[in-house]
Image (spheres, grey):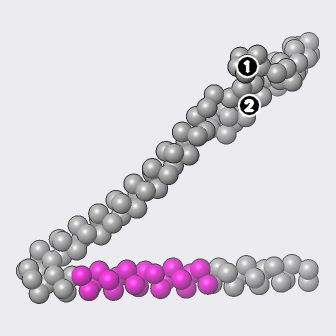
Amino acid sequence: MMGGGLARKLAKKAVAAAVAAGAALIAVIAFGATIFYALCLVVVPLAAAALTMLLFALAALAVVMVFLRREAHEEDIEDEEPMGLGERAYMLFRQRPILGTAAALAGGFIFLRNPALATMVAAAFTEKSHGRRRR
């Protein structure tokens, strides 16, 4: 069997990832219990539970903010205006796939009805834009 080795490696990696995720979950639960019981020594159990929940909520909020900031930074890099018509079409398909598919189907129908229009659009796609020139 040709793909047997690949399937075994993939299965081993999946099992290792599941074991690591399970161990991480147990560690987080144990850490939460440790914090709860340590706070029980200082405050009443209800307040300890609330403080433990607040601590984990703040940790989750910090993780979310880090990932959102990273995603916003990546979007700022991608926000540059595409140069040509081809790049604009590519960005349309990438950002709004359903709208891009509908536009492609409509364009295909129009091209079937008027082949001369297809030639003009192909020329526009291959033409370089003259919007930004460097000196």
Q: Is residue 37 visible?
A: yes
Residue in the image at 57% along x and 81% along y: 18
Question: Is 33 in front, or is 113?
Answer: 33
Q: Quadrant of the N terminus?
A: bottom right
The amino acid on which the numbered mark 2 sits, given as a three-letter code, is Glu
Residue 47 image offset from top left, x and y in percent: 11, 74
Looking at the image, do the residues carrying marks 1 and 2 touch, with CB atoms under 8 Å apart?
no
Which of labels 1 and 2 is toward the front?
Answer: 1
Q: Where in the figure is residue 100, as x and y percent of width and height?
A: 69, 32
**How would you classify the magenta stretch by its main secondary structure?**
helix
Q: Is residue 29 magenta?
A: yes
First of labels 1, 2 by sequence position: 2
**Horizontal and vertical percent position of residue 14:** 65, 79
Q: Is residue 103 visible to the viewer in this orientation of the structure? A: no
Residue numbers of the magenta segment = 16-35
What numbered label is drawn on residue 123? none
